[in-house]
Structure formats: structure tokens, C-alpha cells
Image (tube, rainbow, N blue to C red):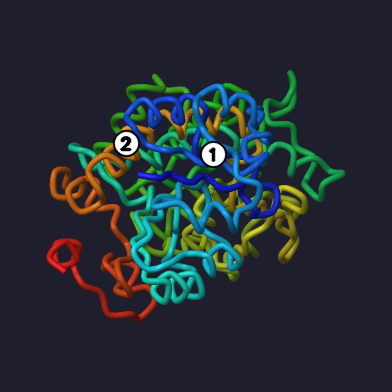
Amino acid sequence: MIIGCPKEIKPQEFRVGVTPNAAREAVAHGHTVLIEAGAGLGAGFDDAAYIDAGAQIEATAKDLFAKADMIVKVKEPQAPERKMLREGQLLFTYLHLAPDPEQTKDLLASGATCIAYETVTDAKGGLPLLAPMSEVAGRLAPQAGAWALQKANGGSGVLMGGVPGVRPANVAIIGGGVVGTAAARVAVGMGANVTVLDRSVPRLSYLDDVFMGRLTTQYSDKGAMEELLPRMDMVVGAVLVPGAAAPKLVTREQLSLMQPGSVLVDVAIDQGGCFETSKATTHQDPIYEVDGIVHYCVANMPGAVARTSTIALGNATMPFMLALAGKGWKQACKDDANLLNGLNVHAGQLTYAAVGEALGIDSITPQQALET
């Protein structure tokens, strides 16, 4: 198979879909790997590194899309990229379709087969291709929030760890999954008073054991939220419903409960955000204010640490990429039900029910797509 990896064109996205090591593996398995010139520079990989790995450099994305059987990316294809997709081509990347009707419409019209990293599962029901970036985003969230709390950035001027005689920041993390656990680890390490909210009592018990009393766990409901918000300097939104739009857990009305200069960090923004007032921002212009509350809603947080993120993502995606290239998407998905769960679009039809429900589009099952 001819595998193509274009340069990411989403603003301030420095990651790359294929590392030199992944390219080397693919070439060793008999595949051709095409890398757009300069695609890896943001992550610290120059074209020479890919050439040494046996890949070929393509001058333009247009040439690469025209030649490749499979496109491997990081972020969802942008409008110019979607126009270059063709019928029968395979796209393997993050998609986050539920809050993005325009992208969904274009992918359906392209006739391509699209497998989304964020809905591929594992034997335990986890999300192995989302987890590494969730780890990164979770660890970044308290850092980003601490920066936003600084007075010069519009925040209240509270230091995360405080100083002797002055209380540290109060931080609430909504969701105790991969993102929430990673965020809690860093926030606790920075010396903040941390409360994690979740609706899974076993998960709260697990976090209580792991952190050995260094944070507070609380069952998540509207009453708990309204009790906590007036005391919180930072709230991290870390809730995920796989493939679906994120639930809105803090309303605009509830912002009035918070102190001016408090910070909301929405890690769920790729799925539409879990705060009613969230809208996607970029690393270049990461924050905005609503009713005196600072919002940090960067839609590609891991792109800020592109080297770490690219390597972590490449480690996770490489086995699936090799399976798709070696067997073709149909056989690879027949052999691996977890990979089949990643199928979101095929030949003009939506194949992920949660996206269909979010956007009001009819869908078929991935199994039905295998039979067409």
C-alpha cells in the first residue's frame, strides 16, 4: 500500500501523523511511504530523517493525496484537504465528527473510508489511540490554567501552590478518567487543593486509593457543582462520551457563582466542550473571557508539546496503521473488532451511531459497511 502523511495545516498544529520510526516499519513491511516536505519539522523530524527511514518526500499535499492509498494524519482534515480526498481512499486520523457537521458532510461526499483514532477501542473498552493524547492534554491542563490564572492574562492572580500563610489554588476536575487523572497528578504536584468529580463510585474509590488522601473525591451532580463553583479558582473539564458530543456540565448561568478571574480549562473542546460558554481557540490566541471568567479552550492542546505528543501517538497508531496497510481496511477490521469500532464513514454513509444522533444523520452499523 502507498501510505501518505501530509503536513498538518490546522493553526499551530506541529505534530505529524507518521514518525520516521513508523515510516521505517512500514517500508520494512513492503509498503511505500510518502511524506510531504517539511511535515515533521514541527516535531523535530527533518526530511532527511524520513529519507533515511526509506520514505519518499512529496513536494505538495496535492501530489501526496493523489498518489496515496491511505492518508495518515493527526488532526481532522481541514476544508482544503477534504477536497483532495477521493472515493475508495482510506483516511486514518482524529476526526471528532459529532460537533462538526461541515466536516462530516464533506467526508460523506468524498466517498472515502474514514477511521477515527478516538473511537478505536481495546479489549477492556478503553480508547488506546486517544489515551496518549488524553495523558498529554491532562498534564498540560493545570499548567495552562495556572498561566491563565496570572493577573496579566486576565486571571485572579492566584498561585497554584500558594506560599506559607497563603492558601493554594482550589482546583476542580470534572471527570476522573485518563484526562482527569493526569490533570489531578500535575495539579496535586503543583500544590493545589484538588477535588475530582465523577459519577462512577468505583473510579472515585480508585482515585482515593491512588492519591492516598492528597485530593478530595466527590460524586458529580448539579448540587455538588453549584456548591463547589464559588470556591474554585480553576475548573478543568475532562469528561468524554466516546464519539459523541460532550455534555454541558457548567452553564452560562452558573458562571455567576464563580469568583471573577477564575479559569475554565475545557479539555473536551474537540468534542464540542463541556462548558456551555466554550468555543474552540488556538495556541496563538488561547483564552477569552465570558462574564468575568477566563476560558482556555485550545482544541489541540497536545500540539504545544509536539515532540512528545508525536512520538506517543506514533507508538500507539503504528500497529493499526500496519494492519490497515497490510490487510486492507476490510480484512483488518474483520480481524479486529476494536479497529472496526473506529470506522466512522464509508462510501458516503455514516457508520458511527453517536455521531448520527448528534448531527441528525442516519447511520448504518460498521458491520453493515463491511458487507457492502
Identify which residue, 187 or 22, lies in the foreground: 22
Residue assigned mark 2: 322
Identify which residue, 27 or 168, lies in the foreground: 27
Mark 2: few, some, or many residues within 10 Å (few <14, many ≥20)?
many
Query: Mark 2: which secondary structure?
Result: helix
* Mark nearer the viewer, 2 or 1: 2
Which numbered circle lies on residue 85? none
Q: Examine the rendered structure and indicate whether residue 59 appears above or below residue 108.
A: above
Q: Residue 256 is drawn in which quadrant?
A: bottom right
Please tell me which of labels 2 and 1 falls first in the chain: 1
In this image, 177 relative to 261: left or right?
left
Q: Examine the rendered structure and indicate whether residue 156 appears above or below residue 142.
A: below
Horizontal and vertical percent position of residue 40: 62, 35
Q: Amino acid at mark 2?
A: Leu
Residue assigned mark 1: 137
Q: Examine the rendered structure and indicate whether residue 237 appears above or below residue 52.
A: below
